[in-house]
Every structure is written in C-alpha cells, then in structure tokens.
Image: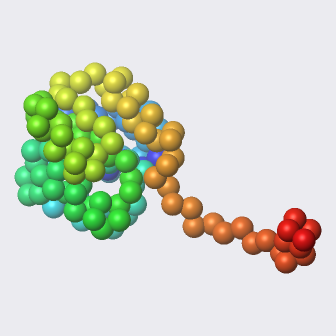
Amino acid sequence: MSKILLLEDDANLNETVTEFLEEQSYEVVSVYDGHEAQEKLYESKYDLLLLDVNTPGINGFDLLKESRAEGVVAPAIFITSMDSVDDLEKGFESGCDDYIRKPFALKELQIRVETLLKRGFFHESKELIQVSKSLMRTVFP
C-alpha cells in the first residue's frame, strides 16, 4: 500500500481527496498547514506528496524545496489554484514532478498519482547482492 502525504488547507477538499484516495487503497496522511506537513515529513517516509501551495505556515513551494534539500525523494504533485506560467515554473523549480490546477477531476488526480507511483524511480534500494568469489572467478576468469 502506497503512503501519501496530503497538504491541503481547505477542509472540504482535504476530506474529499483523502476519502477518494483511501477508496483506491492508498494510505493517506492529511495535514492542513505547512508546519504540520514538515513535521510529518520528518517523522516518516512517503511514496508521494500532494501539496497545496497557498497554505498556512510554510507554503507548498518552500516546503518542497526544503524537503528536497533534506533528501526527500518522493515524487510530488502540486494541487493549486495558482495558474500562471510563472507559478508553474516556480513549482517545477522547487522540485515537483507534476502540477494540477484546481478545480480538478478526482479521476485526473488518480491517473497522475498512479503514473508517478508506478515509475518507482524515487525508491532507493538498500539491498545489496552478495556475489561469492568463486562465482566471480567463473564469470571473470
């Protein structure tokens, strides 16, 4: 089960997105302000970040930029009403992988989430494969 951090200060939208994603079998941790999101990122790892931009405390752009500097590699989608090309550019410069403008269809959000999660490029493998010396001599005499 993929774990998603949702930062959205609009209570109705937060609840709607959370319920929708949970129905799609995702674990969703929802928060309402940037400081709370920052704490959650410090406490746990997530497979995907859904971040509103205009939030109390730390805004989504700054939160993601700081998180990337701290080594957070989970893909991020901004969900925002900011719709200028300059805002889009700022979002991608801060480290996002996708940008969806409000209002949006939940199905569109689902497609974008699934696309990023299936890539798996952001997962760091900590597994090492031990190769015996005798096998090494066989392969590389």
Residue shown at the point (37%, 48%) measured from the top left: 75
Where does residue 49 sit, x and y in percent of width and height?
A: 32, 48
Where does residue 63 sit, x and y in percent of width and height?
A: 19, 57
Residue nearer the viewer, 79 or 135: 135
Residue nearer the viewer, 99 or 37: 99
Where does residue 111 sit, x and y in percent of width and height?
A: 40, 28
| Count of labels in the image | 0
Where does residue 113 sit, x and y in percent of width and height?
A: 39, 36
Q: In this view, does 45 lie above or below 89?
A: below
Residue nearer the viewer, 140 or 1: 140
Indicate the quadrant containing the C terminus: top left, top right, bottom left or bottom right.
bottom right
Residue shown at the point (16%, 44%) measured from the top left: 90
Instruction: State the colouring used for the structure image.
Output: rainbow
Q: In this view, does 34 lie above or below 27?
A: below
Q: In which quarter of the image is residue 50?
A: top left
Q: In which quarter of the image is residue 103?
A: top left
Residue shown at the point (33%, 30%) measured from the top left: 109
Instruction: Please say whether residue 72 is visible from this viewpoint.
Output: yes
**Residue 25 appears left or right of 43:** right
Residue shown at the point (42%, 51%) measured from the top left: 47
As drawn, which residue projects farthest toward the bottom?
Answer: 133
Q: In this view, does 26 lie above or below 102?
A: below
**Residue 81 appears left or right of 64:** left
Instruction: Please say whether residue 33 is visible from this viewpoint.
Output: no
